Amino acid sequence: MSITTESKRPPRKKRSRTRIEPHHTPVSDRIDNFMEVNLGYLTTEEIVLEAERCYECRKPKCVEACPAHFDVRNMLVHVREGEFEKAAEMVDSFYCFPSSFNRICPAFCQDSCIAGKKGDPIEILNIKRFLADNFDKPDSFYHTAPKTGKKIAIIGSGPAGLTAGYELAKLGDEVTIFEKRMLGGMLAVGIPEYRLSNKLLHREIRDLENVGITFVERKAYGRDFNYKDLYEAGYDAVFIAHGAHKPKYMGIPGEELEGSMHAIDFLRKVAYGQKNLIGNKVVVVGGGDVAIDAVRVARRLGSDAQIVYRRTLEEMPATKQEIKETLEEEVPINFLTNPVEIIGKDGKVTGVKLIKMELGEPDESGRRRPVPIEGSEYIEECDTIIQAISQEPEYEELQKDNLEISRWHTLEVDPETYMTNIPGVFAAGDNVSGPKTAIEAIAAAKKVAPIIHDYVLNKGQEHILEHGELF
């Protein structure tokens, strides 16, 4: 909805080191329900005052740190000048689902903000969110180039699939996005409602139909069709962006017991409305955003839930804001602790054997390697254990089609063109890089979209002449 405001840039004052605090639902009002926790900013005055803290760096670290290089600096200039529509257009033209995305971005820009070196980093994410929430998308959002007559099939409607679909539709190509599960991919089935409302997400996705994108739900690659079927149906190229939805487990004894599950499966079932999934005492294993989401959802479902993580708070990869909110909700996080066995009786989980850890030398990730402390094992009683250590792409059906798969079960692609070993079949996002963040998937999609467009316009015939029939 558009808003009308008379706000103008206030006189420039001494730059504050303290941020204008975004609004949050009080802890007492949120721990037993799924209402939104971070409410962001509520007025234009708030975002102007926050934008006033920008140092206007000549070489903005915030832009460099963003994998997609969103122009934060100039957006903040527009906000500070009271040019809200211009600032909002920058946000809307960069992200095809701006309100949703700016609720879940890990905010690498803020981590690199120069203002944060001397005080609080600028709340870039909440400023972008306010602009996306309160100003209508401009006409330019829906404007497309003349139709090319080229058809492109996209597999997966997560951040990479939606972004590539939008960019290609804007270039005039006919785009169809096929989704196996729920529209939005991991955004829809992996992020709880208190962080991102599915109603909001699906409204933004449906808005992309006005750009010309067609969505086909409940259709899975391998089960319902493959790239050969798509070529026979008249598609000129295929972009595989199905993410990394397959759980990876630790491989410890007892994982087969009832009550042992993976966070990806748990969060997906909750997204589909299932509630009776866990017991009264829950242990979540992991230190990333998925682990944080799982433990906070478990608490909201009424369970006594805690996290065990093998490193310390400093090494925890979860978003700082999510960790902060978790601690505010008094969810226990047991650091330097790792499971070695799931204990059970009569086929059901009754507890987990944990061991204390200490940090040794740095590993390949640059973080200090956790080392077990001999003789420190103990049993923690629980009836549910949820692993959130990692996930990987669902690769089996792709492998059947002779697509090259790496030893990490990701798709092998040309690093310059993102094309797989099958001519005209491209891939990018988590199914190539392994599980990363939404903004990294968006960045990859923004790179691959013009390459696919160029291929279907100019290079398809060349490949056919060079390699023979496509299938």
Image (cartoon, helix red, strand yellow):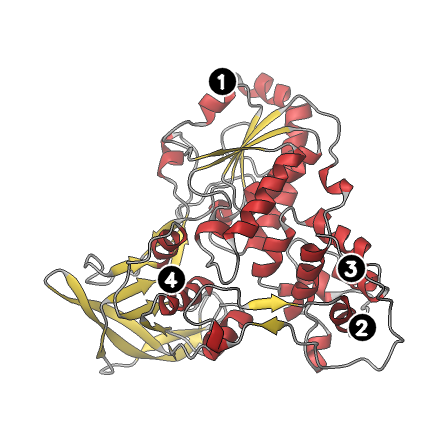
**Picture coordinates of residue 448 (x, y %)?**
62, 40
Q: Nearer the viewer, mark 1 or mark 3?
A: 3
For mark 4, does the 10 Å Cα neighbourhood hold few (<14), some (14 to 19), or many (20 or more) residues?
some
User: Quick one: SS at disc 4?
Assistant: loop
Evaluate if marks 3 and 4 touch, with contact meaning CB atoms under 8 Å apart.
Answer: no
The residue that disc 1 covers is 232
Q: Residue at x 60, y 55 (%)?
A: 101
Q: Position of residue 449 (x, y in %)?
A: 64, 38
Q: Position of residue 295 (x, y in %)?
A: 38, 68
Between the residue at mark 2 and the residue at mark 4, the CA separation in whole angstroms equals 40 Å
> In what element is the residue under mark 2?
loop
- What's under tag 3, amino acid-wise? Met
Residue that carries the numbered disc 2 in the rendered image: 52
The answer to whether residue 315 is left or right of residue 353 is right
> Between 451 and 92, which is closer to the camera in this rendering?
92
Q: Residues within 10 Å of mark 3 (few under 14, many from 20)?
A: many
Distance, label 1 to label 2, CA atoms, is 56 Å
Q: Nearer the viewer, mark 2 or mark 4?
A: 2
- Residue 307 percent coordinates (x, y): 36, 73
Taking the view exactly as shown, the residue that stands out farthest to the right is 11
Q: CA distance from mark 1 to mark 3?
A: 45 Å
The kind of residue on which mark 2 rests is Glu
- Quickly name the residue at label 3: 75
Helix or strand or loop: what does disc 3 sit on? helix
Q: Earlier in the sequence, mark 1 or mark 4?
A: 1
Q: Amino acid at mark 4?
A: Ile
Q: Earlier in the sequence, mark 1 or mark 3?
A: 3
Q: Which residue carries the number 4 mark?
A: 389
Vertical position of residue 297 compared to residue 335: above or below:
above
